[in-house]
Image (cartoon, rainbow, N blue to C red):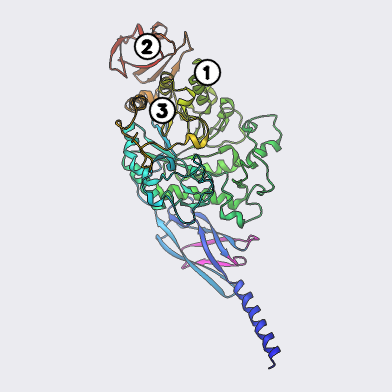
Amino acid sequence: MTKRKLLFTILFLLIISSEVFLQNLRIDQIDPPNWWVGMKWNKVQLMVYGDNLNNIEAKFTGNALKVLKIHEVENSTYTFIDIEVPPDLTPGEYDLTLSKNGESETVAFEFSKREQRESGHQGFGRDDAIYLLMPDRFVNGDRSNDFIEGFIDSMQHIPTQQRKGGDLQGLINKLDYIKDLGFTTIWSTPVIENNTFRSYHGYATTNHYKIDPRLGTNELYKKFVEEAHMRGLKVILDHVANHVSNDHPWLGNLPTDDWLNGTIDDHIDANHNKMLYTDPHAHPSTVEEVYKGWFVKYMPDLNQKNSFVANHIIQNTLWWMEYAGIDGIREDTYPYAEPHFMAKWAEAIFEEYPNSNIVGEVWTGEPAFLAAYQGNPKIPAYVDTKLPSLTDFGLRDAFVEFLQGKSLYRIFSTIAKDHLYSDPNMLVTFVDNHDVGRGMFYADTNMARMKMVYHMLMTLRGIPQVFYGSEIGMIENDDHGTLRKKFPGGGWEDDTRDAFTAEGRTDYENEIFDYLKQLLHLRKDNKVIRQGKLTHFPIHDNVYVYFKSLGDEKVINIINDNDEAKEVDLGPYADIIGDTTKMENLKTGEEVGTKRITVLAKSASAFKLF
């Protein structure tokens, strides 16, 4: 053989072997990473990542598990396999084999036994009070995970936008603090992986099945939930169905062409007119813009009309609920995801966990618009969302107006619109959260007004929520990076004091802390405050009077917004008070009569009739 022929032969063999190599079947990852025996959602869609995954066959070892369908997509680095998990399947690992053209790849897939938990999936409701925290800014319980190789935030040089180092161990360390304060439920902003810029807030996902390693591990998150349950505390999972980060691996290799609503370079900007869902005059194209629009370029908008995307979101939510024993969901940016899908998503959760609860974030202060988002709506709605709870921005806006010096009237008038809701008692009420300025900022440190608002928050209707740090009167404005301040004493290198203790708090901080703690425990100790029927009266002479009644129990609340003490004639409320001649001031223990009562200037009082 001549040298030329030899060279030609070698080149030919190299080309052939290269082509064969490129055709090798490969499995890199499967979502979800496991499933459970006995779930009602027993038809599971496996999302397989790898290479050369087109025109494959798939089967599990033995005959117990059935492959229902293999979905072909144009991108051969993905395939979607529908399987059915029989209710009597023996828990354990089962080999899944994919084969093609004589070659095969096998991976073990686990079907776990469901845990028998004494607590978990409990939901949350009007008996609860929610403590909202942002893990990165709350407590640094483990400094060893402050920096993780491969996880670098490009905004780390900006003091208000950088990660501070708080983590899940920090949350575990302060569970007793949260319980002793009087809260029953913890809502943490998202803790799954956000390997992207401005990563501390958690709302730009890069891996749906992994806790961000700078916060901890999947196992540590599960431990956090278990430790909370051991203390009688519930846990709410902050979930995002609407979008992911532009650094999510999908963005470099989309599973399908319609995985997103548009592309990074060609998409609709967010239409924030959420009232279009209830507007009888709205053009369909403008309604579509609400759920197809992108918040910002770095948060690509998922297309929930794509069935593979839809299944991924539902299964991921169920996976975290089952894996960690979560009690309920807070759904971020609720109106911006496709509404019919979101209703299906909620149905799947309640089918699996009927005692759970979901609160949808709907950022509008107009009750007439907000009410249409609650499940079983009383007013015309685009779709029945199935949501039991909503974030009550209407009452929040009214509280803020009052904190800024306006009258009590908007609070009264907002409550008077409760006829619009299917269940106003299930609204999550608040003064501030991680997206809006602190209550004390709007009050301009007016302690008296802040106390009156906290009293109304805890004694009107709904499920009250307080943002971490507001219990010590943090005063930060509505700049996101600023208001999400580190909690003093959270294990930071620059700590000079520990505001988790009375000794470490200032007199100002102890005053608001002690007041809020008293209110939380009054609420916890008096079922009538949590569950009683609300009866209120129009504002008269800057005084707001309302009752909570449950069976024979009654509590009268009096909010005096005057600069002087006020003698209040209780005669107009005689039909509610009845024959009772005595009341107890729930804050002071003082016994008073039921004819006339003097209340202090700029104060809120609660009296229990007996």
At a point 59% along the width and 28% down the height, the residue shown is 369
CA distance separating discs 3 and 1: 24 Å
Residue 554 bears which disc, if any? none
**Image quadrant containing the N terminus:** bottom right
Q: Give the residues drawn in magenta, as a range.
A: 51-75
User: Is 195 in front, or is 593?
Assistant: 195
Q: Which residue is mark 1?
A: 410
The correct choice, above or below, for 90 with respect to 406 in the image is: below
Q: Locate residue 573: give its quadrant.
A: top left
Dot 3 corresponds to which residue? 473
On the rendered structure, is 455 left or right of 391?
left
Which is nearer the eye, 526 or 439?
439
Where is residue 82 drawn, in percent x and y?
55, 58
**Residue marked by disc 2:** 600
Q: Secondary structure at mark 3?
A: loop
Q: Disc 3 or disc 2, which is closer to the eye?
A: 3
Tell me residue 496's x, y (percent).
Answer: 35, 37
Q: Earlier in the sequence, mark 1 or mark 2?
A: 1
**In the image, what residue occupies the spot 31% across and 40% down?**
231
Residue 453 among magenta residues:
no
